[in-house]
Amino acid sequence: MSRRVRRKVARKGKEKVILPSYPEIEEEISGVDRSGLVDWTSLPHDTVIQLLSCLNYRDRASLSSTCKTWRLLGISPCLWSTLDLRAHKCDSTMAASLASRCVNLQKVRFRGAESADAIIHLQARNLREISGDYCRKISDASLSVIVARHEALESLQLGPDFCERISSDAIKAIALCCHKLKKLRLSGIRDVNADAMNALAKHCPNLTDIGFIDCLTIDEMALGNVVSVRFLSVAGTSNMKWGTVSHHWRKLPNLIGLDVSRTDIGSTAVARLLSSSCLKVLCALNCPVLEGDVSFAGSKHKGKVLLALFTDILKDIASLFVDMSKGRNVFLDWRNSKSKDKNLDEIMIWLEWILSHTLLRIAESNQQGLDEFWLKQGASLLLNLMQSSQEDVQERAATGLATFVVIDDENASIDCGRAEAVMRDGGIRLLLNLAKSWREGLQSEAAKKAIANLSVNANVAKAVAEEGGITILAGLARSMNRLVAEEAAGGLWNLSVGEEHKV
């Protein structure tokens, strides 16, 4: 779980809450012909997100009321392409009600094992993507049923929590059921054995993106049999035999991106992997053995990019492009670039994902000796990632900003240098823009963690107030999502404590 500053939040028990109105939404739907159906995908994005955010699936009565509201608006769930359940408690009642209506659903995002059990009821034969957060309790049985019912699945991501109840058996079920699978990212698996790897190699010929993150053991040799893989992350995975791995994996014919961050890989294995003819990017952040070898010179491998705590990460990423400025906003420059290269686009999208994951993990561990990294590179990296088009990358980056500034949980101590680095690089405005987003996941991460924690610093609190943060937080404090409302109130509390904050 992410570290955060302690703060008092006013509570009113079971006092009745007056729900706010949303004039923006009323304006958007004022011209809708309620006698017909509205194509869900044609509605403005923020309108869709806010409509979903207004829903409360906690009991049958509210579910019935919600369905009635949909009918009045002329919105048919059967037209949905994306369903985000992370902000709500999804139970079997809700899932059963939506099951027959979501036949055209292509993407589902959920949070928690209870939601995973509930979406078993979905009958979305066209489902392409499943992404789940905090899935510690999800089991082999639940996952096997989900993939068996959605054979068209192309992307499956579970994490960043530790999926301790998922074993190689579930991975074999994935391979046997989902032959179109392109992306598989799982966190905290106890054991990924040879049978599971070989099943993926045999039955999933399109599998190009694999992530076995924070796993206890992986059969390294069998993983090398998945010759289709182009992007591979084993960040945080222990018990790797790097001597064997480096010899075997360097022969993978399509591997262009490899992430070995937070492992005990050494300089010899890194050098051998960089000698691969096809590998372009090797990410090795927070690898103590590698960092302890002062004689290592990773720059001698021309045409290769090594990302480590001792390298200039943003500059090295920019070196992948021949026609782009070498500034500190490399990800933003890439997004705004008119001349796009499909292969480089894939690398950048992958880099956003793995960097956001690793930086958050490093921030959560609260390691000593990383002050220089956070001040010179870490803050800028997180702010770059906060502007990603990938929502999960944005959320992790915002959470990372909230976490890395806290140096003492018990005493609610904030590192002033780190907090002001965020402010200096324009982070306050970015965070407030995310806080205004209708996407509750981003609201929650930005409001309850980053803005609230940063506001403990007097200079940052003043900047938040000057940027209109008080008005934004006050609006979030009226949210119908209890967590968003409480944490926004916590941010207001931090802004108000101390005379210097009466800003």
Image (cartoon, grey):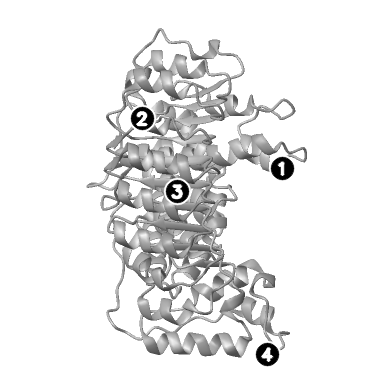
Disc number lying in front (1 or 2): 2
Residue marked by disc 1: 336
Residue marked by disc 4: 34
- The mark nearer the N terminus, 1 or 2, is 2
Disc number lying in front (2 or 4): 2
Disc number lying in front (4 or 1): 4
Label 2 residue SS: helix
Q: CA distance from mark 1 to mark 2?
A: 38 Å
Q: CA distance from mark 4 to mark 1?
A: 39 Å
Q: Tag on residue 396?
A: 3
Left or right: where 225 falls relative to 138: right
Residue marked by disc 2: 220
Q: Is residue 264 above or below residue 347?
A: above
Label 1 residue SS: helix
Q: Is residue 162 visible?
A: no
* Amino acid type indicated by mark 2: Glu
